Structure formats: structure tokens, C-alpha cells
Image (cartoon, helix red, strand yellow):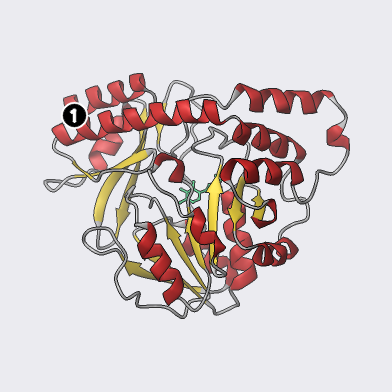
Amino acid sequence: MAGYTPGEQPRDDGIIKLNTNENPYPPSPRALAAMAELLEGDRLRKYPDPLGTVFRQTAGRVLGVDPNCILIGNGSDDVLTILTRAFVPQDGLIVSPTPSYMLYKTLADIQGARLQTVPFTDDWSLPEPWPLTQAHLTFVANPNSPTGTLVPFTRLEALANELQGPLVIDEAYVDFASAHALGLARLPNVIVTRSLSKSYSLAGLRFGFAVASADLVRELIKVKDSYNCDALSLAGAAAAIADQEYFRAARNKIIATRERLTTGLSELGFAVLPSHANFVWARRADRLVKTIYEELKKRKILVRYMNYPGHGDGLRVSVGSDPQIDRLLEEMRALI
Ligand SMILES: *Cc1c(COP(=O)(O)O)cnc(C)c1O
């Protein structure tokens, strides 16, 4: 099998890194303090809480969900792995719209299962009726990557009802959107996944979670590694999600910069879809954009180049800080 290819993580600090949707702002000072405090005690000597009780209670309060409906993960990728392991037999079927998150294919390969994809409609929604309802697991990233587009709640609700199996709504980017689907996690076949990597600036910590019915979560806990989240990440994640004031301020800055980036790239002749995430997907009708990616890289600006069969190529540009985006647009102007 071919493994998943993560975005480049260069060691050079001088690079403007806009390729893996990391947050340009630091994590909440309260999250950092909670982790520092833990390091001073003797907590690392002992195993962590396997259920992440403090995180579940805190996130439950912040999000308005029952803590028993929350499953903790070592990054939301771990949650996606747990779901695949729990629901998909060997030779089973996973379905996802395309173009979307490439990891779904890798998860299918690891499991010895097939991934079948369904193209988005021309307006980036899901075809109606959905053509493959008999999947063991259906993944829909919403907002989607690399497009940044958002499928309406009502369409997801209808899809959940059409499907015979579970629907995973991957909300890794939803904090940058104007709507979310947590309300659908009450349905018996819906699992909503979240990540602290992007909107909480904790990609290096590795923490994500799922929200689903308490019955489902109870079963999924049997499948996960007992100690899938370490004590440090549990402490940091609980403090980060409790600090909603800090979170909102950083998120609002990113949304404002995203709008400037969208306008700036459009003025340079890119076709940019309105984004609901912390990145934009920029394509051109007049040429392939690979050389632009390469030229930017020479100038120490890293964006993600992607080429999807049938959809052409494009640049996925993470929303950095305002000065980073100014530099990017300046270099782009010189290149085009
Ligand atoms: C980044 C990303 C994830 C993974 O997030 P982690 O919590 O860092 O594992 C999951 N799904 C999508 C669509 C992503 O882009």
C-alpha cells in the first residue's frame, strides 16, 4: 500500500509555513500553564485517566453535550482510526465525497477495505439522492479540505437518514465556519469529530475528540487504546477548550485575514472558493499552478500543492498572520 503523505514539516524557522493549516497564533496561555503545572508535579509517573474525565466534563459544558457522548483521541486522526477499526470489516466499503481528505483512503488501505468516492456536485454540495448508501462507514469532511466549502446541515441530516451505516462528519475546521452539525450527533448513526490542532493552535499536542450517542461511545471505548491520550495533552486540551474567550479572539482574527487573502488572490486572477475554514483553495483557469508553488518555495513560502484527478490542480493556502499573508500576496504579485 501507499502510505499517507503528510504536508512537509521543514526544520528551517525562516520559512513562512502555509501548507498544513496550523494556527499562526500561540495556544491559550491557560493551556500552557496547565501543562507546566502538571510537569512540576509527579503526574507523569502514573498512567493518565483512560476516559479523559476532566476533558469530557469541560468540553461537555462548553459545547452543551453530555460528557458520556464524548470520545477522546490522540488527534482527531486517532478518532478516525478508531471508527474505521470499529465499523469496517476486511473487504468492507468506506465512502467519501471527492476531492477530500486523503487520509480516508489510507485508513481503508490499512483496514484491507475499499474506498469509493462520490464527486461533489458543481456547486460543492452532495448529490441527491446519495448513490452509495450501503457503506460500512461514510466520511464527510465539513468544511471540506481542500475546497473549504460547507455542506448545509439539512443535507447532512438527510444523508444520515439515507445511509444504512454510520456517517462521520469530520469537523476539523468547523470552528472557522458559521454553522456546525453537533445537533446531529443525537442520531444513532452520526459521529461528529473535532480537532484541537487548528482552531486551538495545538497541532503539536495531538488531541481530538468525537461526539456521538452515549451507546456508540461506550462501544468505541472498547476499541481505542486504553491510554490513547497522555496526561499532558489531556491537561492542555481541557484548559484550552475552557478558555473560550481566547479561542474566539484568535478565530475572529483568522476569519478576517481569510477574507483579505480571498480578495487578494482573486485580484491576482485566481479562482478562489468562499472558504469556511482556515485555508483557501486557489485555482487558475489559464495555467497549472505547480510552478507558482515551486517559485514560492524558493522564496521560503510553503503552500500545499494538490492535484486531484478530474478536478485539476490548485494551491491550498493556510490563513497565516496578517504580515505572512501580506508577504505571500506580494511575492505572488511579482510571480504572476
Ligand atoms: C487536520 C485534519 C484532521 C486531523 O486533525 P488532528 O486532530 O491533527 O489529527 C482531520 N480531518 C481533516 C479533514 C483535517 O484536515
Residue 2 seen in this snapshot: no
Mark 1 Cβ inside 8 Å of ligand 1: no
Does the rendering let one see residue 117?
yes
Q: Is residue 309 above or below residue 329?
A: below
Q: Is residue 87 left or right of residue 48?
A: left
For the residue pair 105 and 95, the one nearer the viewer reads as 95
**Residue at image location 38% in from the left, 42% down from the top:** 277
User: 22 or 301, which lies in front?
Assistant: 22
Q: Quadrant of residue 115?
A: bottom left
**Disc 1 element:** helix
At 77% from the left and 50% from the top, the residue drawn is 227
Identify the amino acid type marked 1.
Leu
Residue 134: give x, y in percent of width and height. 46, 80
Query: Looking at the image, which residue is at 73% across and 35% down?
Result: 232
- Coordinates of residue 219 in the picture (x, y in percent): 71, 67
Query: Where residue 279 sits: x, y (%)?
Result: 36, 39
Check the image and report above or below for 224 versus 325: below
